[in-house]
Image (spheres, helix red, strand yellow):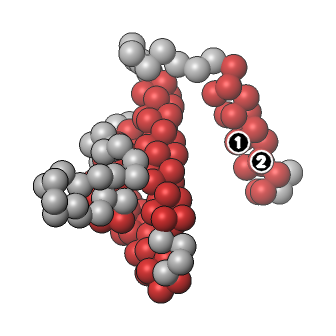
Amino acid sequence: MNYVAGLFLAFSALSAYASDSAPNCENAMTTADINQCALIELEAAEAEMHRYLDAALNDHETDAALVESIQQAQEAWEGYRQAHCDAVYTQWRDGTIRGVMSLSCKTQLTQARTHTIWETFLTPMDVMTGEPPSLLPKPNR
């Protein structure tokens, strides 16, 4: 079996395992369950970030230069997140905690990025009321 086919089978088996027996994340005990719960949390944070990013891009769709700048900033941020969380993984490389530490790093940075997108591109300043209206609610951090 070639390398790609082996990877496909391994990921298929892992995917089947993950969908058949979701861990109880309130009481996760094994490394595999803890990592899977951290991945679930990251996926939720990424979905929320993309919802805010899409809203920002849609809200500013008439300003092509701004849309392009936001997209470039997002790409640069994604590179930063990967590099930073890879460094966290390397810091913990000798322990089984390395996976959850890297995933947690990505989740925290993603939540912070969501807040930044909201604050910068979805919350126009309203000088009259002192409280800026927002296109989406303030995201959790």
Q: Which mark is residue 8?
A: 2
**Contact, mark 2 vs mark 1 (Cβ under 8 Å):** yes
Q: Position of residue 107 (x, y in %)?
A: 37, 46
Q: Amino acid at mark 1?
A: Phe
Q: Position of residue 131 (x, y in %)?
A: 18, 51
Q: Is residue 23 above or below residue 88?
A: above
Q: Position of residue 77 (x, y in %)?
A: 39, 69
Does residue 112 appear anywhere in the picture? no
In the displayed structure, does residue 126 sit left or right of residue 98? left
How many circles with numbers are drawn on the protein?
2
Q: Amino acid at mark 2?
A: Phe
Q: What residue sits 16% from the left and 59% below the top?
A: 128
Dividing the picture into quarters, in which one does residue 13 lie? top right
In the rendered image, the quadrant that contains the C terminus is top left
Q: What residue sits 36% from the left and 65% below the top?
A: 121
In the displayed structure, does residue 132 sit left or right of residue 55? left
Q: What residue sits 63% from the left and 18% below the top?
A: 21
Q: CA distance from mark 2 to mark 1?
A: 5 Å
Question: Does dot 1 land on a helix, a strand or a loop?
Answer: helix
- Residue that badge 1 annotates: 11
Dividing the picture into quarters, in which one does residue 125 lie? bottom left
Q: Is residue 87 above or below residue 105?
A: below
Which residue is at the front of the view, 60 or 101?
60
Q: Is residue 63 above or below residue 92?
A: below
Which residue is at the front of the view, 90 or 84?
84
